[in-house]
Amino acid sequence: MIGLGMIFDETYRPVLEQLRQTGLFRRDFGLVEVSLAAVATRTGRRAERLKQTGCLSDFQSFIEPGSCDQLVESGVDVVCVATPDDRHFDAARLALQAGKHVLIEKPSVLRLQELDELVRLADERQLLAKVVYHKLADPDHKRLRTLVRDGVLRHVNHGYCSLLEPKSISTQQFAEWIQGRNPATYVAVHYLKLIDFTFGPEWSLARVSATGQRGLVGPVDGRTWDSVQTQVVYRYPDGREAAFDIHTSWVTPDNFPGYVEQEVQFRFDNGMWNAHQRKRGVEVTVEGRTPNEMKSTPNHHYNALVEEPWGERRQRGYGLEVIQRFFEEVAYVEFGGPSTERAKRFRAMSSLEYNDLRSDRRVVAMVQALEAILARQADGEPGSQVVVNDPQGGLVLRIPGRSESTILYAGRV
Ligand SMILES: NC(=O)c1ccc[n+]([C@@H]2O[C@H](COP(=O)([O-])OP(=O)(O)OC[C@H]3O[C@@H](n4cnc5c(N)ncnc54)[C@H](O)[C@@H]3O)[C@@H](O)[C@H]2O)c1
């Protein structure tokens, strides 16, 4: 495990604790042991705390500098990368070079050049290289995709999604790495992937634009963004277009009852799909505890500690399922039949579009585009746009008032 931050605590830790107790079992691959063998973190403090507080104590801990090199050489089989988003690539590359299967937190990487390199290494060594987008496992989103695939909802035309994080995220949890970063790369990717996976694959990405606000997390003329609005436009084979606006922020007041405010609206030729996180489920108040220590509008489908009717206590939800599923995919490749058929099993698992890096091209392209647009804006040139698969290149940045373009990525997206 590389990185032991918030997402490790919420999802990896409970999955690893449960797998340690139960093992991982399926008829095709039998019983497979999954244990936390080693962790790499910046300072080692969280690793110490983990050793003292949980049942996961029997692991090696490596710290910076060189923590990832030492971890991949320490005899692990699989590496999960949950470091800040601009530190995913180096860690994942080291792991693949050392022959380890890799799972990376979203967004997988920030540039298509990095994605190409990881996919090349994974192909060369026949390793799984995957990314976590847990929203694809949300029952509501699975149902949405099912209706689209069955032709019940036809031809999405436009949509709006928002994901607004509390200020404590930017000012406390992420204070170490937030300088120069933006909330769209951090959370718009959830919806960019949902849109791309749910309504694709026959369309192509056409254009990306973005703007945002500064002045709270960092200086008003700096490179750290409070909130970002991104628009992506897709083109169908018949020439019709679909546009999606995604609003993100990490400066919502901490006492806002939504905690993480999330909404989607999609309009089709023949229908509408509107979903709001705070309006779909539970609203709870506990004096002195909500909305800060406990959330007022929790999403128990994502992640919840529950006492099962049969007495067992466990943390469960699609945020955990999606990580366990990755271990099942690795177990299937390595143990799901004779070694002579490993290549076939590998092809089957690496062609799963929901999590394979090979299928993350358009999302990484959108991230690369929006980061380049925001960087231009920070340099005093707002309003640029990235055109996709133009004759000049795969990602072409056009700046208003300038005749020359910048090629961000030459190959096709
Ligand atoms: N799926 C989700 O909903 C979700 C939610 C939150 C975060 N994430 C993703 O998880 C990743 C981590 O986010 P977080 O919220 O856990 O962050 P965090 O700031 O809470 O934790 C980051 C961790 O990375 C470690 N780290 C930092 N630099 C390192 C380095 N160079 N080498 C080794 N370890 C290093 C730190 O020690 C820390 O343990 C991000 O990519 C983020 O986008 C996903």
Image (cartoon, rainbow, N blue to C red):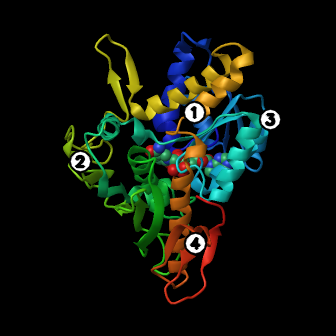
Q: Amino acid at mark 4?
A: Val
Query: How crowded is the residue under tag 1: few (<14 C-alpha within 10 Å), some, or many (20+)?
Result: some
Count of all numbered marks drawn on residues in the image: 4
Question: Would residue 98 appear left or right of 182 to someone viewing this image?
Answer: right
Q: Nearer the viewer, residue 52 or 208?
A: 208
From the image, tell me which residue sits under label 2. 273
Check mark 1 vs ligand 1: CB closer than 8 Å? yes or no.
no
Q: Amino acid at mark 1?
A: Leu
Verify CB contact (< 8 Å) between mark 3 and mark 4: no
- Of the 4 image quadrants, the one containing the N terminus is top right
Spatial CA distance of label 3 from label 4 is: 39 Å
From the image, tell me which residue sits under label 4. 396
Q: Give above or below for 264 relative to 400.
A: above
Residue at x-position 52% and y-position 39%: 353
From the image, tell me which residue sits under label 3. 73
Spatial CA distance of label 4 from label 1 is: 45 Å
Q: Amino acid at mark 2?
A: Trp
Mark before the other along the chain sequence, 2 or 4: 2
Query: How crowded is the residue under tag 4: few (<14 C-alpha within 10 Å), some, or many (20+)?
Result: many
Mark before the other along the chain sequence, 3 or 1: 1
Mark before the other along the chain sequence, 3 or 4: 3
Residue 50 is labelled as 1
Q: Position of residue 308 (x, y in %)?
A: 32, 17
Q: Is residue 82 visible?
A: no
Eye-nearest disc, 2 or 3: 2
Eye-nearest disc, 4 or 1: 4
